[in-house]
Image (cartoon, grey):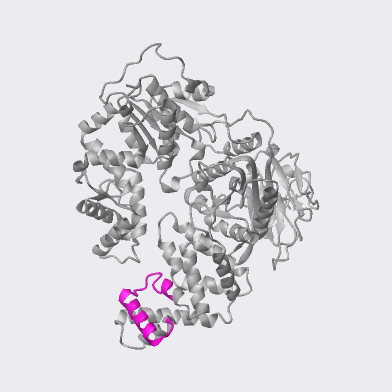
Amino acid sequence: MSEFDFPNHEGAPRAVPGAMPLPEYLTTLNDAQRQAVETLDGPVLVLAGAGTGKTRVLTTRLAHLLSMRRAFPSQLLAVTFTNKAALEMRERLEKMIGASTEGMWLGTFHSVAARILRRHAEVVGLKQNFTILDTDDQLRLMKQIVQDAGFDEKSVPARSLLGAIERWKDRGLTPDKAGAKDRADLARGKAVDLYRAYQDRLLQVNAADFGDLLLHNLTIFSTRDDILADYQRRFRYILVDEYQDTNVSQYLWLRLLAQQHKNLCCVGDDDQSIYSWRGAEIGNILRFEKDFTGAKIVRLEQNYRSTPPILAAASGLIARNAGRLGKTLWTSSEGGDKVVLKPLWDGIEEARWVGDEIEAMQHKGQRLGQIAILVRTGSQTREFEERFITLGLPYRVVGGPRFYERQEIRDAIAYLRLVHQPADDLAFERIVNVPRRGIGSSTEEALHVLARTARMPLTEAAAKLVASDELKPAARRSLGDFLARLDHWREIARSLPHTELAARILEESGYTDMLQADKSPDAPGRLENLKELVTAVAEFENLEGFLDHVSLVMENTERGAGEMISLMTLHGAKGLEFDIVFLPGWEEGLFPNKRSLDENGVPGLEEERRLAYVGLTRARKRAFISYAANRRFYGQWQPTMPSRFVEELPPDEVAVMAEPDLPVRARGRFSEFDSGDSWPRTRVMAPRSFKAPLIEGRATRIAEPIPPETGKYRCGDRVFHQKFGYGTVGAVSDDKLSIDFDKAGSKMVIANFVTKADADGRIG
């Protein structure tokens, strides 16, 4: 029998002193990694920075526990967040120990919780063969609950209710514990009652959703001390991956299971906690020492991924966060290019620059599969996708469909197609009842029957049915209203600019309202995609030109094999790494994201900064940050300000890159440049007091470019504002001033609201 084939019983195996020499797996670890592996007793928090060998430490710790005979495989519990991570850990462990890991409790939180729940399902009113519902099944069930309660699906969207229930379950709250005032704005204050009805219906059909798996575990442990005690005895050692991403339910679950032996080892990085929007609670990792008495913290800071400049830039940026335990990444490697900072005129120019840089890299032998563009929001991918298609650069959108393949974009384009071409039956079928307007399957069937027999488009068939008594009055009114809207949009299309037409259609169709009422986490992103679609429409002379362009784009987006550029959001990039990383759109309002700041304040800002840290640390060799001076929103050009994160980058790690004919005005730490300077293609700064450079100049594609500074105020003027106090003018745009206030930070204000100060700082 192998030394790893322990019998499955409750007693712990005894260590055999001197039986084995120092295992080879320990000799390959650095000092901090070895400390994390060998500290076996009591609670341990391993703060594992990006690229510091987190998975290696977890796997080696499991191997060490087995090799030291501290526990049988069945007495080890290791939980991860993804099946991929669990599979990778198991494969590495089996290779390391040369034996099977059968019997070990190694899996995701949900898979382990489901295993426990099936053993004790009757405690919560389920049978052992209960079904775990997917999202579609949950939606169907919730729609039944809403209907049975007498609510209209439009006024109480099932998806919004499920989102609220998911958050309650993330916090370990059953219907009896959920506060009535929490989400009082939903379902006319009846959200908790609907939550209770939903849970009752789940029991009736012998089913559970994913949130229930942990929630039911907590109920079992809190009502059956004997069951809890059994698992507390069983799990002598507990290991947790990505602890910074745990929610309240997961934290409570772990804390209960670890109470007897207290051998809980959590591996995570407080600087990479970026999922609060889906329930992650960063406080779990920040208060680890308080929650688990006698806890030891081990910091993994030696990075094996990135170059020194990239690590220094990332560490300097994240150091601005107050809510962190603190660590500084370093590497034993030397050299490496500085982080490139690229100011650009607008988003179109940004996409063109990224495409040109990638083409140049490709010609020098750089693999496209090792290049990534990481954006803050999904709507940012469009300009890059279109540029890559133009250049013939293969790409893939990781974690979601390409821009023009997204559901909301396809729906919106169907509206535009139907307005432009009334005989477009495919477009008619897609949006005749989107959003829902009471046009059911029987009405649609009648439409198709008439269209086939009379050999006419569905639009004409609909008009004939509305003028007849073939349909029920409610269906006839709904269909008639839909046709009237189509006629109205076609009428105003003759005089209204196509950009405004697109925006009007999305508003008046109810599509925008539908997404605004949707409280699911992805709804804001879908709204941003619609805004980006309107921006795309504005880049063409007319609606027909845009629709032709979309058809050509869709024709040329066949996925092929081979090397492809990765295009994804910063959230989707966590855990990945690439040789080259582009980080576009570092502008205030876009990144940090305005919605995140408005909804969450300082915690939201710190999470946005953690996203920036994650983005930088995905790069192994080179990182490029860019921002534009202008962005088009709903077809209108608007000036933008560089992200505060640009200003927070350590200046010694940054190189500024600009076109020879693009004048850049510097302020603050780039003070060696005056407003008339033209920057060379690449120039490494010797900064003093670093602030983001602002771009000036003209672009022929913009009808009303931002003019150079004129009028009463100039860059460098000292001014006084009644609310913000004294400050220095950093940029002038028409009657607006960008001012760096001494105490209030950078603000954009109207010139009429400030007073110029004299040389001594006095105001007149």
View extreme (front): residue: 1
In the displayed structure, 243 sits above or below 366; it is above
For residue 106, above or below residue 482: above
449, 493: nearer the viewer:
449
Question: Does the segment drawn in magenta span residue 432?
Answer: yes
Q: Which residue is pictured at 25% across the width and 24% down the height?
A: 9
Whether residue 720 can be seen here = no
What percent of the width, then of the height, locates residue 34?
A: 49, 22
| Residue drawn at the location 20% of the way across and 35% of the way down | 224
Foreground: 61 or 241?
A: 61
Q: Is residue 679 left or right of residue 557?
A: right
Residue at the spot 65% in from the left edge and 52% down from the top edge: 627
Above or below: residue 388 compared with residue 72: below
Which range of residues does the magenta coloring cover?
A: 428-457
Q: Position of residue 303 (x, y in %)?
A: 57, 32
- The quarter of the image holding the N terminus is top left
Residue 409 on the magenta span: no
* Residue 465 visible, this angle: yes
Q: Main secondary structure of the magenta part?
A: helix
**Which of the 4 image quadrants contains residue 170?**
top left
In the displayed structure, does residue 740 sit left or right of residue 561? right
Left or right: 182, with 668 as reference point: left
Q: Nearer the viewer, residue 295 or 189?
A: 295
Q: How many marks?
A: 0
Q: Residue at x 48, y 60 (%)?
A: 526
**Residue 693 at what x, y percent from top left?**
71, 49
Q: Quadrant of residue 550?
A: bottom right
Where is residue 397 drawn, in percent x and y?
53, 54
